[in-house]
Each structure stands twice: as C-alpha cells, then as structure tokens.
Amino acid sequence: MSVTQAELHEFEQQADHWFAENKPATPDFILPETFMEVGTDQQFEYLRDWQNKVYEAGYVGMAWPKEFGGGGMDQVFQDIATRAMAKHRVPFLPNTIGLNWAGPLILHMGTQAEKQKYIKGILSAEDIWCQGFSEPDHGSDLGSAQCRAVKDGDEYIVNGSKIWTSLGSYAKYMILLARTATGGPNKYAGLSFFLAPMDAAGVEPRPIKKLTGEYGFCQTFFNDARIPASSLMGKEGEGWKVAMATLTFERGAVGGQAGGLSMMDLSINDIVELARRAKRNGRPAIEDPHVRGQLVDLITESRSNALMATRSNVPALASDWPTSVSMSGKLRSSELKRRMCQFAISLQGANGARYVSRDAVDGGMWQRSYLNAFSGTIGGGTSQIQHNIIGERVLGLPK
Amino acid sequence: MAAIEFSEEQSMLLETAADFCRTHSPIDAVRIQIEQEHSTTPELWQAMADLGWLGVTIPEQYGGLGMSLADAVPIVESMGRHLMGSPYVATTLAAQALITSGNEEQKTHWLSEIAAGAPASLALTEEDGNWRLQEITATATANGDALTLAGSKCFVLDATQAKVVVASVMLDGVARLVLIQADQIPSGALAREVVIDETRRSYTLQLDGISVPQSQLLDGADFVALEQAAMLLLVAEMSGGLAGVLHVIIDYLTTRKQFDQYIGSYQSLKHPTVQILLSMEACRSHLYHAATLMAAGDAEAAEEAVRMAKAQGSEAFAFAGDRAVQFHGGFGFTYECDAQLYLRRALWCQYQFGDAAYHRELLAPLLLDAAV
Ligand SMILES: Cc1cc2nc3c(=O)[nH]c(=O)nc-3n(C[C@H](O)[C@H](O)[C@H](O)COP(=O)(O)OP(=O)(O)OC[C@H]3O[C@@H](n4cnc5c(N)ncnc54)[C@H](O)[C@@H]3O)c2cc1C
C-alpha cells in the first residue's frame, strides 16, 4: 500500500483535532492506571464507553481487516492515531487483552468463523477479554498449570481455578490454558488453549482486593463449567504453543496489535515538574544536588528507551543480539516506571508518608502509582523471569 | 528529538570496519601489540590510510572524503569492539581541532598531511587531571615572531609517532590552541606514562624550551566542539567495548561448569549479564543519536546527547568490565584472562574527558532548568 506524505499529514491533523475535541472530561472518581486495575463499575463503564467512542470514530484497529470490523488501512495510520492519543493524554483503551494479544492471536491463527465472531467485539469493547493463565500454585511456572478440561461430547467440562484474572468480573471471554491430558512426555504436553465464554454456568470470578486497597483482579473458579468444544484454539494438547504465541504478542515482540494506549502514561517530565513544586526542607526539591543527579539519570534512562525504539528502525545498527531490544521492552519500561514512582515519593519530605487523600501531594497519586507499578513488574511474567528469558533466548545462556 | 540517522554509506563503513578489525585485531594480536613500542604496526596504519579512514572527516579540498565526524563513529566503534589500538582517534581529534579552529593555511598544510597518512595528536589535559579544557596552566608567551611555551601536558596519545601535536595553552589569559611539529619537540621532552589501558601509548609533553612561530597558533579555539568530538569517539570505543566484553562473559558462562552445571545457569551471573546487554543497547542508541545530532550541526542538542552518552556509557562499561573479572573466578584474577583488558580499557574511557558524575552535573542545568 502506498501512502503519500500529504495523506499522512492530513490524517495526522484530523486525528489531532478529533482527540483534542473528544477527550473525555476528567471524572470525579479516580481512574485506574492500567487495565489490570479496573476495580469499580464506574471506572469500567467510563473506559469502555471511551473505547467504544474511539472505535466508532475509526481510531483503533485501523490496520485490522475491514471484513471483520477493522479499518483495513496501513499500519502507519494507526501509529499516528496512537501517538495522538498519547499526546492528548486521553484515557487508555480497557480491552487491552483483546486488542493486544487475544485479537492478534485470533487474526494470526483463528478460523474465518472465529475472526467473524470475535474481532469486532474486541475493537468496540462490547466483548471484554480476560486471560486465564496463572493459577494459585503455578504462576511463573505456567507450564505446570493444573486446571482441568475434560471432553464430554461437544463440550469440555472445566474444573479448577485461575487467579489474578484482570478484568475477570467484566469479561465476556477468557483465553484459558487448561490441562486436557495428564501423563504426557513433559508438563507442556496435555495443555490446551480455549477461547472460553465467561457466562457459562459454573464459571465464577471473585474479586480480590489489591495492595492499594482497591479491587482490580479476580480469582476465577470453575465448577463443572461446560464450555463448547468449538472454543478450543488450535489442536488439543498444543495449548502451550498457542500460549507462547500469545506471550510474544503480549511482550510486544511482534506487531499486529490493534493500537491505542494500554495504560496511563507517566512521563519523566511529570516528575521534573513535580520536583519543581515539591519541597524538601523548605526548598524546591529540584534545587537539591542529590535530587538533580537522580533526575538526570532517570531522564537519561527514559531517553535510552526511546532511542532504542528508534534504533530498531535502522537494521544496520542492530547489535550482535538483534532481538534484545524487542524482547526487553516490558522489562525496561516497567522497571523504570516503578523506580520513577518510588523517586517521586522521595521528593515530598515527610509528606512522602501520606496516601490518597486531600492533604497528600497531588492527592497521593504518586504513592498509589508506586504501589500499582508492580502490576508491570509482576504481571505478564515477573522481571526476574524476564531476565531469565532474555538471558536464555537472546544471549544463549543455559537454563 | 529521538532521531537516529544512519546512511547507506555509513552502513558500508560499519561493515568494512567490523570486518577489518575482526581480521586484524584478534585478541592475540592485541596482546602482542601491547608488548610493542607503538599502539599499532606500520602495515596496519597504512592499511587504514589506504581505506581512506584518516580522511573520513577531512573536507575534500584537503584530500579527505568530506564526510563528518559521525562517519568516524562506526570505525572507532569497531576498533573498540576488538580493543584495537592505533593513533586513529588521536589523529581524528587533531584533525577536528584544525577543521574547527584552524586558518586556511594551517588546514591546507596539515589536513592534507593527515589525510595522506600522517599521525597527529592532541595535548589538552594537565597534571591535575582537570576535565575543564580551558582551566589550564601551560602558557604561550609572544616573543617577536615566536611563541615560547611553558608548562606540561599529559595523556598525549601516540606522541612519538605524531607529526604534529595540537596543544592547549594560555596566551594573554585566554585558552588557545597551538600546533607543535614533531621536529620542534626536543629529545627528552616526551616521557611515556604508565596508564591503566595497556593498548594506549600515552606521554607527558614537557613544553618548557619549546618555541614555535606565531603562524602555528590556531586562529580559533573551539574547545566546545573539541570536547564533544572527544567524548563522541570515546563513547564509540565504549559501545564497541561493551559488545566485546559481553562476548567474553558469555563464552565463559556457556563453557565453564561448576556443581555439574554451566555457571551461566546461575541467576546471580545470568541476570547481571542481561543488564550488561541492555546497557550496551542503550549505549549504542545514545551513541548514534549523538552522532546524528553532531552531524546535523545542532550543537546544543548534541551537547546534551553526547554528555548523556558519556555518562551512561562510562558506568555501563565499567560495570561490565568489573563483572567480567568477577565472573571468571580465579582465572579472572590473572593477566592471561581477557577480562582485565576490557576492565582496564573501561577505566581509561571512564576517566578521560569526564566521568558520569561530572557529566550529570553539567547535564542538570541543561535538562532541568530550561524554560518551563
Ligand atoms: C496486577 C496483576 C495482574 C495480573 N493479571 C493476570 C491475568 O490477567 N491473567 C493471568 O493469567 N495472570 C495475571 N497475573 C499473574 C502474573 O502473570 C503472575 O503473578 C506472575 O507470572 C508470577 O506468578 P506468581 O504470582 O505465581 O509468582 P511466583 O511464580 O510464585 O513467583 C514468586 C517470586 O519468585 C520469583 N521466581 C519464580 N520463579 C523464578 C525463577 N525461575 N527464577 C527467578 N525467580 C523466580 C518471581 O520473580 C517472584 O518474585 C497478574 C498479576 C498481577 C500482579
């Protein structure tokens, strides 16, 4: 597809204008920072309505096939629209699991019927998706998952539980990793992957309170839950392969995502600005030489991340380990965000000890953000596990 | 802001340079060269001249290729990757001093010489190790048509090979640059320094007793450009060195066994190694970003970028060298282990032209006190 510079420019202005005009008013309740923290109906509805509006205006799924509800356009248009969202700091799109990993997976390996059934609802946020991978006893060691699915005619009967299910209370579908056979040659054999309906009888998501005191994810119980056999994705016993494909979408190591923001963006400029306002021992924190040094380091590190993304566009400058940049995106950005929030609290003197309340600096958002930042460093594979993966797959170090 | 440009020509240069350095600077050759008087062999120097590298940054009218300093980056990075010593960096920086501060006559003479293969060097730092290039005590005093020099300069690289040295001196209370030809340096004025990076040939230059014609004073004195150029090429060496030391670490972690396991399977070795990988990727990104901005002539943005690169790279390379020694156990403590070569190189790079703390301090006003 050839696109002219003029077309791109015109589209950029159009998107810029639309997001400026349509940015929703800040609600009088606190918004979650990522899809992993949607804890109240109010929050959920606000975000879902927003995604629906963005979809109706044509700014998400722009590069997904038209026949299934996408825009059928070149990826560059989506990239421009996503940038406009970031620029105007509009809310994130809550159907993150659908837009960024279930959707691309279905488009990548689903049947025509599956694409017809699921894609449009993912984009419009009518059908929210959740992910049932982790279990109480098996998180990092996902391959040992024990939740059982036994075939019975044209259904599977599911028993067991999944945990830390983000959006579990709101989801219509779950990408579910369950064990359909035991006693295989290794723990991965016998796992199967389902696009499971959450409204099946016997599926019960129970909210769990997070460290912030808010709600945000669930434990999802399966008690003789019957799901259609047709919800199996790929072949029985090949679930691990499908789950791994999902994780490559999740880590952003391959393209195909629908676009849009998936979390509230925290920029280093926000922290510099806080350092100008916040006081340490009566003086603006930004005047403290120690604070200045740390700020320079954080700015340098966020610039490193931005530049690595830029350098990926220059294949000649790939290092001897060409996948390192794409494989480390989540690790680098989530760890940086956690440390930025930690640092932001340190700028507040004794007020660093406050939490969400009127008296706290910026209403306590930094403390809340810090606690929430662990969602990035634990969810989707912990930072320790990311180090293992990069060490083993990128550097070739032994397991 | 986050632009990185890399042309087809630069890609070719990088490929050629990577190939050349891999072929001519295997680690055994580096160790043999360490024992020699000079930092490189005449044959290799000639080969670099034949490839046109000495003239990469020199304008065409003086016999160069008319490219920019950014085009020397892939060459220096490849040298750094293989710990290849040579007067290339010193010569390129001396050329840079002439390009930014020399008059037509000086350029015509010396840039043509350099492009044709004459090594050259810079004499900026002094005994007190101050990184601020204009805070110096060496002097030049006008004496009729001549300038009488006094004081001494340190870390003059490859000085015994250089056909000309560009030295900084105070003249009438202002820091200036003056050319000193090899035949104007009396015997005994150069003394070899013992430096931590044994691939370097570094000298103290005694200026007392040296006198040069006034015509050897450079018209300009662009210390800002010179410092940026020096930092950029050091970061290029560090970026290459980080990749080199990472290979050394990985080789050992995937071949050495303890407790019946490859030591690379232990996370206290694996995870820091991943950190080194990511810091190398960061360094390389900052490097080519800074090079892009310098080539574009955006001095202010370039200063920010190159200081960031120097701060980040200095800490990253020093950490990598330090861990490389530790991860080799008892063997790491030996002269025979290659880890020390990289650690010593890292320390050199870290402490020449400003360490991380120094650049952070200079970056703070640039990044934090700009108009809100
Ligand atoms: C906010 C949030 C949202 C989430 N949303 C979802 C969701 O929607 N769906 C879903 O399926 N899951 C979700 N998760 C679960 C998440 O993927 C797991 O929590 C994570 O993979 C870790 O598993 P675990 O909790 O069992 O911890 P464990 O695996 O028990 O880990 C405990 C500690 O041991 C470390 N560790 C474990 N194994 C190793 C090893 N081999 N090497 C080094 N260190 C190791 C870990 O890094 C961690 O620090 C979510 C988690 C969070 C925090």
Image (cartoon, coloured by chain):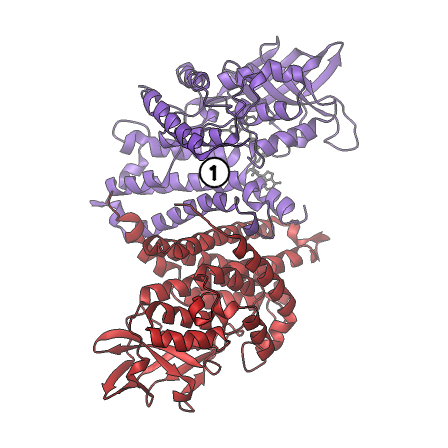
Q: Quadrant of residue B45?
A: bottom right
> In the displayed image of the protein, which residue is found farthest to the top?
A201
- Quadrant of picture, ligand 1: top right
**Vertical placement of B274 versus A380: above or below?**
below
Residue A268 shows in this picture = yes
| Place of residue B118 in the rendered image (x, y in percent of width and height, measured from the top left) | 48, 78
| Place of residue B195 in the rendered image (x, y in percent of width and height, measured from the top left) | 47, 75
Query: Going 47% across and 25% down the picture, which residue do you hit?
Result: A35
User: Which chain is the one coloured red?
Assistant: B
Q: Front-most of A325 and A229?
A: A325
| Place of residue B226 in the rendered image (x, y in percent of width and height, measured from the top left) | 36, 66
On the picture, is B261 further left or further right than A380? right
Q: Front-most of B6 and A384?
A: B6
The kind of residue on which mark 1 rests is Ser
Q: Quadrant of residue B332?
A: bottom right
On the picture, is A63 further left or further right than B121? right
On the picture, is B261 further left or further right than A20? right
> In the displayed image of the protein, which residue is found farthest to the front?
B61
Question: What element does badge 1 sit on?
Answer: helix
Circle 1 is placed at which residue position?
A334
User: Which chain is the one coloured purple?
Assistant: A
Q: Quadrant of the C terminus of chain B?
A: top left
**Vertical placement of B202 versus B92: above or below?**
below
